[in-house]
């Protein structure tokens, strides 16, 4: 079994009087993680699968007495895929306020739905975490450092979803199912998407532009939709943990880019499945984009699991000076460039150095990336 980094973070919060909310895409291992906590208290835990219609009915409009009957003697109550339950926020509030010995552990695969349902009712009553596909540290801990390095090129191509990592030799088939079935399930269930074919075109367009700045107008022209529709769909894809956006850093220089965004995929394998390209790295033209996407998505995981509260950016000027990735902590900056192969000296742009006085400037390659991702 792959030990997940989130496990210890959750354990720290159990019994501290608040609901624990775990958000993340389907098939990232949320259910496996929360069920692992039942092994410690098999007779005192209750697992409720909200994909089950009967569970939805039970929890959608309960009163306190009915909740006491449902929960019984359980002191750990797990509600899986809670966004399926109408009024779940009020139900959780009722439990927290009236049954103080019950620890709630709740998962959801759409932050748009579950966050909307729980933000107001659970103000001050919840801890919230994100669960991602397997992290580089988790892979290292599972297979060992040397074996993980031997898998690096495969991970750039096939990504880090648990069932893809575990089932070597079946990656393409597994990713095909993930990208075609699970990717859209929660988004389409919202009923907001009126043209699924536009969503598919948009995802493919984004896959081809990983690491590049994107314009809503240009994306709209590519997929045949107005920029309002494109913006709505991008928001849904982000809230469903398919993509994430990087904003430009622009504070001091008149010619800094300030309005565009870069879009990345949480998982390289999903990105490659969308364009149906699993060719080895030495036959690809997009190795640089794959490396950049992998490094930034893995850094996102590492920052979250290690509770590093950073703000992230890219930086570029109209004169085409640029930096791939910038982190800000307490007003101090650190800059990173991603190069698959080691190159001759790469110098920090003078304008950036003078304006932001970064603590460091690092070129991350396959020879030194472990220091960027591992504690």
Image (cartoon, rainbow, N blue to C red):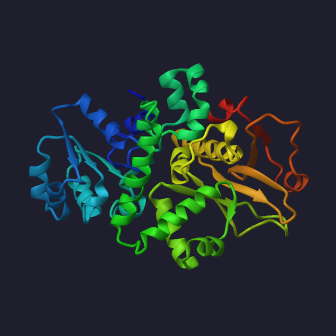
Side of 328 where 156 appears, left or right: left
**Residue 204: percent from the left, percent from the top?**
55, 60
**Residue 149: percent from the left, percent from the top?**
61, 26
Where's the C terminus, which quadrant? top right
Side of 8 where 51 appears, left or right: left
Q: Is residue 229 above or below residue 326?
A: below
Residue at 46% x, 30% y is 168
Q: Nearer the viewer, residue 244 or 65?
A: 244
Quadrant hosting residue 146 = top right
Residue at 57% x, 34% y is 154
Residue 276 seen by the camera = yes
Q: Nearer the viewer, residue 245 or 360?
A: 245
Quadrant hosting residue 66 = bottom left
Residue at 60% x, 41% y is 279
Q: Is residue 9 above or below residue 70?
A: above
Side of 53 where 208 appears, left or right: right
**Residue 220: percent from the left, percent from the top?**
59, 74
Residue 128 seen by the camera = no
Spot the residue most to the right.
350
**Residue 90: percent from the left, percent from the top?**
26, 63
Residue at 52% x, 36% y is 135
Where's the N terminus, which quadrant? top left
């Amino acid at each position: 079994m792959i030990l997940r980094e989130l496990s210890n973070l959750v354990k720290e919060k159990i019994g501290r009087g608040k609901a624990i909310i775990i958000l993340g895409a389907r098939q990232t291992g949320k259910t496996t993680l929360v069920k692992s906590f039942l092994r410690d208290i098999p007779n005192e835990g209750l697992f409720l699968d909200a994909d089950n219609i009967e569970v939805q009915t039970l929890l959608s409009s309960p009163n306190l007495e009915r909740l006491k009957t449902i929960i019984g003697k359980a002191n750990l109550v797990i509600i899986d895929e809670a966004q399926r339950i109408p009024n779940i926020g009020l139900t959780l509030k009722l439990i927290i306020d009236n049954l103080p010995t019950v620890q709630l552990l709740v998962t959801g695969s759409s932050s748009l739905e579950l966050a909307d349902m729980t933000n107001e009712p659970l103000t001050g009553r919840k801890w919230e975490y994100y669960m991602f596909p397997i992290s580089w540290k988790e892979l290292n801990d599972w297979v060992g450092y040397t074996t993980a390095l031997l898998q690096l090129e495969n991970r750039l191509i096939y990504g880090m979803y648990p069932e893809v990592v575990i089932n070597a030799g079946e990656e393409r088939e597994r990713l095909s199912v993930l990208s075609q079935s699970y990717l859209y399930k929660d988004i389409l269930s919202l009923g907001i998407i009126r043209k699924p074919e536009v969503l598919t075109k948009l995802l493919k367009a984004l896959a081809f532009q990983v690491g590049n700045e994107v314009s809503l107008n240009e994306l709209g022209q590519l997929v045949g939709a107005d920029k309002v529709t494109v913006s709505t769909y991008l928001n849904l894809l982000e809230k469903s943990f398919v993509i994430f956006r990087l904003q430009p850093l622009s504070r001091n220089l008149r010619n800094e880019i300030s309005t565009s965004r870069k879009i990345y995929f949480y998982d390289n394998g999903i990105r490659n499945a969308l364009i149906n390209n699993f060719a080895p790295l030495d036959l690809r033209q997009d190795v640089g984009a794959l490396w950049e996407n992998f490094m930034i998505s893995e850094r996102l995981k590492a920052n979250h699991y290690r509770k590093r509260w950073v703000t992230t950016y890219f930086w570029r000027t109209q004169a085409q000076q640029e930096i791939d990735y910038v982190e800000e902590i307490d007003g101090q900056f650190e800059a990173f460039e991603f190069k698959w192969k080691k190159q001759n000296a790469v110098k920090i742009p003078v304008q950036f150095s003078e304006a932001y006085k970064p603590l460091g400037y690092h070129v991350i390659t396959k020879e030194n990336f472990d220091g960027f991702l591992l504690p």
